[in-house]
Image (cartoon, rainbow, N blue to C red):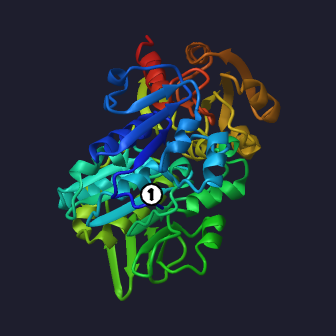
Amino acid sequence: MKNINKKINVAVVGLGKSGIAAANLACDKGYNVFASDNGKIKTHSEMKLNKKVSVEFGNNSEKILEMDIIVKSPGISSDLPVFKEAIKRNIPIISECDFALNFIKPKKLVAVTGTNGKTTTATLIYEIIKKAYKNTVVAGNIGYPLSSLVKKINNKTIVVAELSSYQLEDSSCFRPDISVILNITSDHLKHHKTMKNYVKAKANIFINQKRRDFIIYNYNDKILRKITSNIKPALFSFNTNLKKTNTVYYENGSICIKYKNKEIKISPDIKIPGRHNIDNILSSAAAAFLVGINPKVIEKAISSFKGVGHRIEFVRIINGVSYYNDSKATNVDSTKVALESFDKNIQLILGGQDKGSPYKPIYNLIKKRVKNIFLIGEAAPIIKKELKGSAQMYDCGTLLNAVRKIQTFAENGDIVLFSPACASFDQFENFEHRGSEFKKIVLSLN
């Protein structure tokens, strides 16, 4: 890649949060910046974009190819003709995260990825470290692009970064001190096209790590066991069965960490529900331990952690019926985890924008634990076809209609679970908007 420290010309493709942050950072560094976005025209003020940035909307012109490097925003398709031409011309295409890393040298960089559980884990790691080390920031997919925090980061800062497959697919130079990989299941296949491409993107989190670095990974995930075999960094597994060195496991209410000749046991008061959250807690404890945080601090931080919004989030009880918001369940595996968190009597809301993965994997769980399914959004016909016979289904169209319909069926002791297994973009801005709307509807019920 061209020397980023020279005064170069930078193209930023995609003006979402990450693209805007990268463009602003490039301006701050004195670069000539051109930004291109396929969306509707917005003002610099609306986007909080530096006025020095030259912008085009509605297309991606060949002006991009006049730049020295291209910063590609997460989620932008690699199949755009302008990217293919850039490759032919040997113009480097990098991620926003890689771009930001050129300007920081933190004390430690802890990176978290996985199909599910990233935000909960990254947040918990941050909360643990922050209790012992004030100069800690959390960035990435969690809502704060790394480029927007460059000014706050110095060689005494610990950075915790949550990274999606969209962010990692273009991160060829990324190298954390500690990488955490929670799980890999089918997701985002419309974007990545194949499972192989999706796995490859996730693997970019550790591909550049050295022998002195660590990979914390889920030993029970077959894909992770395969892709982490025969690699340089030290492996640190989390699971409930394997009890060898360099591992963390959960036993009789305690978290046990084995590292070299040390064995440490802590017994936090865990407040977030679900077996999947035990994995999130184990990986968080391991990451904090490897950073050097005292076990007692780790125990206290886990005990005070109440989770992150939109993830099997309790909303309220009405006439004995409990309502849970799991809007972050944007894929089938997430919904599977949510269903496993409750034994029976579930009134389930499914649907949204289809992501190309099958719904069959939750068929048997639904049959055992779900009373009725209430379908919303574009994916309703597909879900109805694939899950036929698993439970009684009702077409509701919208979230409001679904909640109203549920009120006519729900009985004392039932669980209303909004765990859609789909993306939100057919009816909502994002999963947060969708979850907030669900909570607003539920809180307005008499």
Q: Can residue 74 be seen in this view?
A: no
Q: Which residue is drawn at 62% across and 41% down?
A: 82
Quadrant hosting residue 264: bottom left
Q: Can residue 169 be seen in this view?
A: yes
As rendered, which of 51 and 75 lies closer to the eye? 51
* Residue at far bottom of view: 261
Q: Is residue 133 left or right of residue 410?
A: left
Q: Identity of the amino acid at label 1?
A: Val
Quadrant hosting residue 225: bottom right
Counting from the top left corner in percent of width and height, residue 73 is at 50, 42
Q: In the rendered view of the protein, which quadrant contains the C terminus?
A: top left
Q: In this view, does 279 lie to the left or right of 202?
A: left
Q: Which residue is drawn at 44% across and 78% down?
A: 210
As rendered, which of 373 and 62 lies closer to the eye? 62
Q: Is residue 435 left or right of residue 49?
A: right
Q: Residue at x 39, y 80 (%)?
A: 212
Q: In this view, does 104 lie to the left or right of 134?
A: right
Which residue position holds label 1? 112
As rendered, which of 26 and 2 lies closer to the eye? 2
Counting from the top left corner in percent of width and height, residue 319 is at 46, 19
